[in-house]
Image (spheres, grey):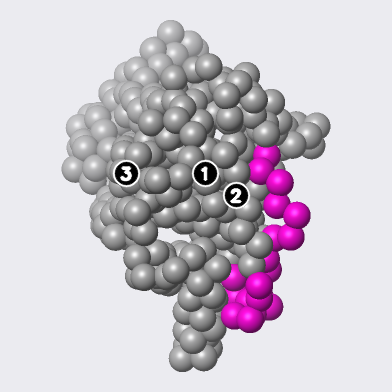
Amino acid sequence: MSRRTLSRSETVNAIGRTLPFLIIVVSVALDVTTPDQARFDRFLFAAPALAAVAWGPMATLGIGLLSMVAAYALIADRTGFGLSAIPTTLLSLLLVTLVSAWSSSLRRRREHQLQQVGAIAEATQRALLRPMPSRLAHVDLHLLYEASAQGARVGGDFYKALPAHDGVRLIVGDVQGKGLGAVEAASLLLSSFRESAYTADGLGEIARRLDTTMRRYAELRPESEAADRFATVLLVELPTDEPVARILSCGHPAPLVQHGGTVAAVPIPSPAFPVNLAGIENDVFEIVEVPFGPGDRLLLFTDGVSETRDATGNFYPLENRIASWRFRPADRVLPLLHADLARFAVRGLADDTTAILAVRH
């Protein structure tokens, strides 16, 4: 959750906890200072009802009791009856208080369940999307990841970087759709990459194994939501002994490379089909090789970044923005990107947002 969202939530919660007492005070003040025909004591019914939104059951009962005391005082001041009389207003207010306390109890129970779900989601994220190391071999790595669903910690985007074959191999991918099916498919592809990155001879072999993993799973679990999902994938190899970057795209957006003072998209004339879309086990893959020397930067991203739109429907000008930050420290680029995307997308980021900035040091 962002700081802005957290601050807004805290403010709303503080207002919600104060409002029942404010209603009691204002109702009493208005009822006392206005003619008897104006019955402001009726607003006291709102106090326990609002208390159920922000307070626990016992506090809600206490606020309801306070409302009843205030209501009795106002009615006694108006009619002059004694303590033995129990007007209908107080009985109704008691009923509202009891119902509000019960509602508060249900809310607390559901909040506890959501906290448990959140803890499970955090454990899932640690298992599925483990924190990326800041450095592998000769490469510095910087990560931006944010799931689109409010409060979610995992989504359909996935990533991984591993030291393999005398260099670094990376994967960034985006599973079609959202929800648990997308998360399950991402888990399958990451598991396959963790194994094949160490043993496969090249990026083409890794792509074939990713596709094989999805096809076999679909055969074993055809009823699964993940079985029919396809995924765009970008595979990158950064060898230690060569100042180059080898790139294979399976339907994924081309990365941006900063070489010297220039920033440009890597030309990928013939990207392969997305994984699990048309079967790529027999494809001949085109591996694109670009210069990647000391100080060069490579930005991998998903379409949640490149296809973000503003209020008029224009796409986010990613290449121009990265070019404008080409002389900024590498560890500042992705925070700048995240803040700029949030400003650009007036209605918020509608898709999972993932970007990895790799820098050869």
Q: Quadrant of the N terminus?
A: top left
State if disc 1 and disc 2 touch (CB < 8 Å): yes
The x and y percentages for residue 49 are 39, 40
User: What kind of residue is marked 2?
Assistant: Glu
* Image quadrant in which you'd find residue 284: bottom right
Q: Earlier in the sequence, mark 2 or mark 1?
A: 1
**Is residue 355 or residue 10 the one in the foreground?**
355
User: What kind of residue is marked 1?
Assistant: Val
User: What kind of residue is marked 3?
Assistant: Leu
Tell me if residue 25 comes above or below residue 171 in the rendering.
above
What residue did someone put label 1 on?
A: 244
Residue under the image location 31 percent in, 43 percent down: 137
How many numbered discs, if any?
3
Q: How far apart are marks 3 and 1 (CA)?
A: 16 Å
Q: Which of marks 3 and 1 is nearer the N terminus?
A: 3
Decide: few, some or many residues near mark 1? Use Cα within 10 Å; few <14, some 14-19, many ≥20: some
The x and y percentages for residue 32 are 39, 12
Residue under the image location 51 percent in, 53 percent down: 236
Q: Which residues lie in the magenta part?
A: 265-284
Residue under the image location 67 percent in, 34 percent down: 264
Q: Tell me the element at label 2.
A: strand
Tell me if residue 149 comes above or below residue 231 in the rendering.
above
The x and y percentages for residue 97 are 31, 44
Residue 267 counted in the magenta span: yes
Tell me if residue 190 comes above or below residue 237 in the rendering.
below
Q: Quadrant of the C terminus?
A: top left
